[in-house]
Image (cartoon, coloured by chain):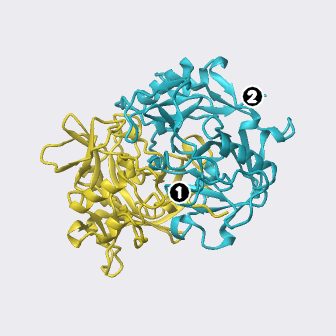
Chain colours: A cyan, B yellow
Amino acid sequence: MRALIPLASIALLGAAPPAKFVTPTDIVASAPASAWRVIPPEYLLIIDFKSGARAVIQLAPEFAPVHVANIRKLARAGWWDGAAIYRVQDNYVVQWGHNDDRPLPPGIVAKPPAEYDRPLTGLPLRPFPWRDSYAPRTGYALGWPVAVDRNRANLTHCYGMVGVGRDLSPDTGTGGELYAVIGQAPRHLDRNIAIVGRVIAGIDTMSSLPRGTEALGFYKERASDVPIKSGRLAADMAPAERPAFEAMDTASPAFAAYLHARANRRDDFFIRPAGGVDLCNAPVPVRPVKR
Amino acid sequence: MRALIPLASIALLGAAPPAKFVTPTDIVASAPASAWRVIPPEYLLIIDFKSGARAVIQLAPEFAPVHVANIRKLARAGWWDGAAIYRVQDNYVVQWGHNDDRPLPPGIVAKPPAEYDRPLTGLPLRPFPWRDSYAPRTGYALGWPVAVDRNRANLTHCYGMVGVGRDLSPDTGTGGELYAVIGQAPRHLDRNIAIVGRVIAGIDTMSSLPRGTEALGFYKERASDVPIKSGRLAADMAPAERPAFEAMDTASPAFAAYLHARANRRDDFFIRPAGGVDLCNAPVPVRPVKR
């Protein structure tokens, strides 16, 4: 017997299927050009694996300026050329970089500030109306999901979000080792580790890797590591080769409609809409720019 | 540079690392025997893949008795011998069974009731004190995470939970096609599809499979399917071959301490405990029974 369960993630790259009710996918597909913002090439870190697979990370200098400045310098110094994924922990994270004690390139800030708790003042916040287990308030600001507590905003550890590996505090990490979330949002890491961006393409390449068998999901053998060919900023690539993406403006009416539809699924498949949604189950729509 | 981020999932199968503060892992490791309940072999569905990998599913007849009765009959009729995983959708589900229109074995209830909204009356509920985006109340009952609304309890679509593939309503699925959650909890499926259990071992075998490239994550080619050798109840295996597991009693003081520690992580790595946790980020501890 053929039996289906429905699409949860919106089909970011596909066309909307026919439906009686307006679905999140419909809203994304029909959103006007004014609802989209092209992500500048200086904000895109392109990770090319030796396998030929690619992951694209949108950086968040609005929230972690020192770490992101480090990451840009690391890319320009060729830090990720020859790096690898060396840790894959089920329902948690994939981590990559150099799993050794090599020195950082010149110009890297070795001890960045702890980049969370950005003041909310001046930050345009679209409040998220549903409850959250971790923070008194949540919302979206500048295209990013945030948790808000006492007028401080923090990026949240949702699926695909990229954070900075660090040692025990007071270490804050440099950006040389990065991880991406591949499971249930580990929101207990919010305000404990700086988030520097999110994977906007190719997360499935990372999430489908074999899990490491050592403690914390580290691979036991170096032969298991997943080699990275290069890590570059799109801004440093020839214009014809640059990938380009646009994200939905979280202040747009289309995004408000999208959130409402995510919380009240009425696709043919559904019997009862939930009437709410988790912040990490309403990812900001991102798609390639049509050329 | 070597930089770590901490273990989120408790090490269900390992020993507790040394720590200054009592961690969730410590609590699980030191919980008394009275805090554990052996899962009866009639409640364990053992899926053996042709690759040699194994997944073990704990069934939930307390919440979905008709579907679980079907699943037991299907196992005894050899339904999963020669079945396959044919769908893997990133950040969503893995689905298996027979992706065709073959008839069901005799004795299967073709149209089970919609098995959610179990009356709360008589159900021992440990209330979960933190907020939830989807339901007014949540908690644990009989060892399972539940959402509660108007005195009705429903199992929740957390990581690893197993549900029943179905067609459009009024179809409720038979249990012949099953799926497991491998991403951010798709809680919008609660009260729309019956949940029949959870994967208690081997979820990493499923979650690390290549993602399907067709709509909804279906594999394009049948050659991509992941063949299943057999699906058996532990009760039907020779006693010496039976895997055996025990789950923490969600009514026990140890489980209360575990929840508190999950919400207030004070391991050396943490700077600020969250003071809350998502229901799906506090999985019920399960471990093999020592023989």
Q: On the image, which quarter does residue B223 sit in? A: bottom right
Residue B257 higher or lower than A124, as above or below: below
Q: Amino acid at mark 1?
A: Ser
Residue A263, percent from left and from top: 42, 29
Label 2: which residue? A290
Image: A11 above or below A183: above
> Closer to the camera, B253 or A176?
A176
Are the two marked residues, 2 and 1, in contact with CB atoms closer than 8 angstroms?
Answer: no
What is the residue that sits farthest to the left in this orientation?
Answer: B122
Share a chain, discs 2 and 1?
A: yes
Chain of the residue on which disc 2 is drawn: A
- Left or right of B257? Residue A141 is right
Give whichever of A250, A282 is nearer the camera: A250
| Residue B107 in view | no
Provide residue B95's location: percent of width, then percent of height.
47, 51
Mark 2 Cα within 10 Å, few/some/many (few <14, many 20+)? few
